[in-house]
Amino acid sequence: MSRIEHQPRPTPTFIERAVNHLVELGLSASWTSHVDEYERVISGVLEIGNGQARHEFPAVASPTPTRADVALLPHDRKTILISDRVSSARAQQLDDRGWGGYVDSAGNASLRADGLIIEIAGKRNSDATAPVATAAPFTRAGLPVTFALLSVNEFFGSTPSQRSLATISGASLGTVNRVIRALRERTPPMLQGRDNQLLRTSALAQEWISAYTAMQPRFWPEERFTSEIWTSPAEVLEATLPPHALLSSEAAAARLGVPIRPESVLMHFDGDARARRELIRQGRLRKADDGMIRIRPALWTTPPVPPEDGTVPRLLIRADLLLEDDPRLDEIRSEYFGDDR
């Protein structure tokens, strides 16, 4: 039998499907939710019985978790993820990041407890479609605006005007207005008052990181280069780079004093074609798929805050460290760049 506890809001369909798939295996299963912590994420308990014993699994439910979510959402080795579908790659990431297992609405599962082992993989939802970001702050056009808002608030403690956000991000005033309105109309709101005071900064930052890490490869793709001048990341860190090239990820962490030896150098570049040619000439850069130097287009037309020692804002360093998809960097991200895990 299955049981879904009565909640103030309806249980999401993907959770119901995941529970029902367990029932189809001859188990009893029930889901009890606790709280909607990050708008798209619900924590709760999945209880499973096999006729001999009942097992409670602390769970985090999110329909389409990103790589960032896998790293950032609070969890331990007992916590499982409930999702719309967990691919083999995502399952490996869950194991690498220290999760206890998962179930999904397609019928895949990996659960272990005393007297209970469930391992099912390779199933797909018949009606699965690619997730589409529809909320204005997290679209391709809105992400730079939300990034500017978060970065300026972290540095200056206030929300800039809509015109300033447009100037920083390069977005139209219409896009900025839609982002601000969407954040004000959230339940509960992210912005309030005449000055658009930012509320629940941590939750908004996590949503931004999740959206950015999912969209970056498509919308802000990087190019890789080798250099005839710089033969190691350390040599790049010692060089005087043009102001349009700001360091991020491991290189930025090293520049800011974190005890780490970066394996590559990631730059976000906001200059025009002429400035780009000058950077390539300075480092004698040549394109190479395995190049040590990585260059991505910047999320801004004007840096949202004064660069700290030639690095991007810390929110972006944190996101780019996640994009490295290296569990060894988790401690650095958490300790030095405000990870709230």
Image: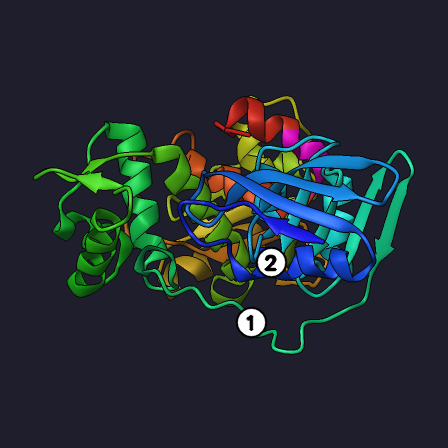
Q: Tell me the distance, in whole angstroms, between the alpha carbons under discs 2 and 1.
A: 20 Å
Q: Is residue 129 above or below residue 19?
A: below
Look at 38% across and 49% down and name the residue there: 244
What residue type is disc 1 on? Ala
The magenta stretch spans which residues?
A: 326-330
User: Do the CB atoms of the residues marked 2 and 1 lie less than 8 Å apart?
Assistant: no
Image height check: is 195 above or below 272? above
Magenta region includes residue 216: no
Q: Which mark is residue 16?
A: 2
Check the picture and name the quadrant holding the C terminus: top right
Q: Secondary structure at mark 1?
A: loop
Main secondary structure type of the part rendered in magenta: helix
Foreground mark, 2 or 1, reads 2
**Marks 2 and 1, the one that precedes in the sequence:** 2
In x, y percent, where is residue 216? 51, 59
Q: Which residue is mark 1?
A: 130
- Identified at 26% across, 59% down, the residue is 170
Q: Position of residue 28 (x, y in %)?
A: 75, 49
- 198 to the left or right of 214: left
Magenta-drawn stretch contains 328: yes
Judged left or right of residue 190, residue 36 is right
